[in-house]
Image (tube, rainbow, N blue to C red):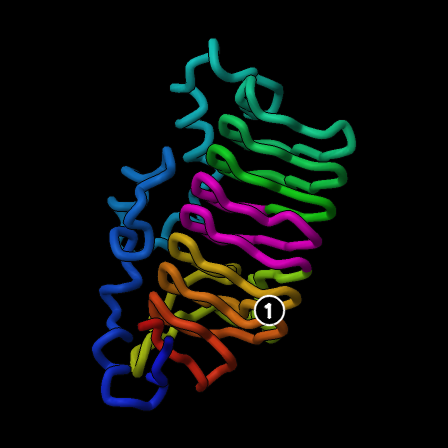
């Protein structure tokens, strides 16, 4: 069951800027970066500091549980990394995570536990909570994904505007200047993005929301909704 909200009287109640804060997007708290994220006013403020934050976290990891590699790379002993996968610098890979064949972890990637980084998927400057799945032909750049967020095959985040101007985040009638030239998407817990969808720079999607395949998404999408197309969003009931 669902009911239309885009343009309806209930829209202003759920398109609330407070729903873009970490404690609303990520109620699971399923990341070792939780304390750090909740110290920020907005989640996207983490994006410029992921590399240095990984170095700080890595220095505190238990080396009985993690293997330390050159260039600030820590991989949990229970994680599986395919021999054809590429792992760049400043990377943490959590317990029981799979990095599958031909994955490209370019660098500055904090990957949680029980995650899946799959065939031809590329990561760059990201925080992925536990249970995130990006298993097929995905690009995730300058983004934060909540617990068990999932991208269908071919779905990507776009992190740079065509005119290379600074990325803004839009929520209702408000516009937030991020000061960032590169910002992908912030996905809440349990977000499902359909195959071959494009998430435009500065997209924020609330927890438990699903996006139809072949969608083009921008701005803020509330939690507990179904995104059919821009301007056509229904609330789960």
Camera-nearest residue between 26 and 218: 26
Q: Secondary structure at mark 1?
A: strand
Left or right, 37 with respect to 151, comes to: left
Q: Which residues are magenta?
A: 124-153
The x, y position of residue 94, in whole percent, is 50, 29
- Residue 105: image x %, image y %? 64, 40
Q: Which residue is mark 1?
A: 198
> Relative to 23, is 1 on the left or the right?
right
Q: Position of residue 153 (x, y in %)?
A: 67, 58
Residue 132 to residue 233: above or below? above
Magenta stretch containing residue 163, yes or no?
Answer: no
Toward the viewer: 221 or 1? Answer: 1
Q: Position of residue 52 (x, y in %)?
A: 45, 35
Q: Residue at x 37, y 75 (%)?
A: 1
Image quarter (top left, top right, bottom left or bottom right) of the C terminus: bottom left
Q: Residue at x 34, y 66 (%)?
A: 223
Figure check: 142 above or below 18:
above
The structure residue drawn at horizontal position 59% and vertical position 46%, both measured from the top left corner, is 124
Q: Looking at the image, is 134 positioned above or below residue 90?
A: below
């Amino acid at each position: 069951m669902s009911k239309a909200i885009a343009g309806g009287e209930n829209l202003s109640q759920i398109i609330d800027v407070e729903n873009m804060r970490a404690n609303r997007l990520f109620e699971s708290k399923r990341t070792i970066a939780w304390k750090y994220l909740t110290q920020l006013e907005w989640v996207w403020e983490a994006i410029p500091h992921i590399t240095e934050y990984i170095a700080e976290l890595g220095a505190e990891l238990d080396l009985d549980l993690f293997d330390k590699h050159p260039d600030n790379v820590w991989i949990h002993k229970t994680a599986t990394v395919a021999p054809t996968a590429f792992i760049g610098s400043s990377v943490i890979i959590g317990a029981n995570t799979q990095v599958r064949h031909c994955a490209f972890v370019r660098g500055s990637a904090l990957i949680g536990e029980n995650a899946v980084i799959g065939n031809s998927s590329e990561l760059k400057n990201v925080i992925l909570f536990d249970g995130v799945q990006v298993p097929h032909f995905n690009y995730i750049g300058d983004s934060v994904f909540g617990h068990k967020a999932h991208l269908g095959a071919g779905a990507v985040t776009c992190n740079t505007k065509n005119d290379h101007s600074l990325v803004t985040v839009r929520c209702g009638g408000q516009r937030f200047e991020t000061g960032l030239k590169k910002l992908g998407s912030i996905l809440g817990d349990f977000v499902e993005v359909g195959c071959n969808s494009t998430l435009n720079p500065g997209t924020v999607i609330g927890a438990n929301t699903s996006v139809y395949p072949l969608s083009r998404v921008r701005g803020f999408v509330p939690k507990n909704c179904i995104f059919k197309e821009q301007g056509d969003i229904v609330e789960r009931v």
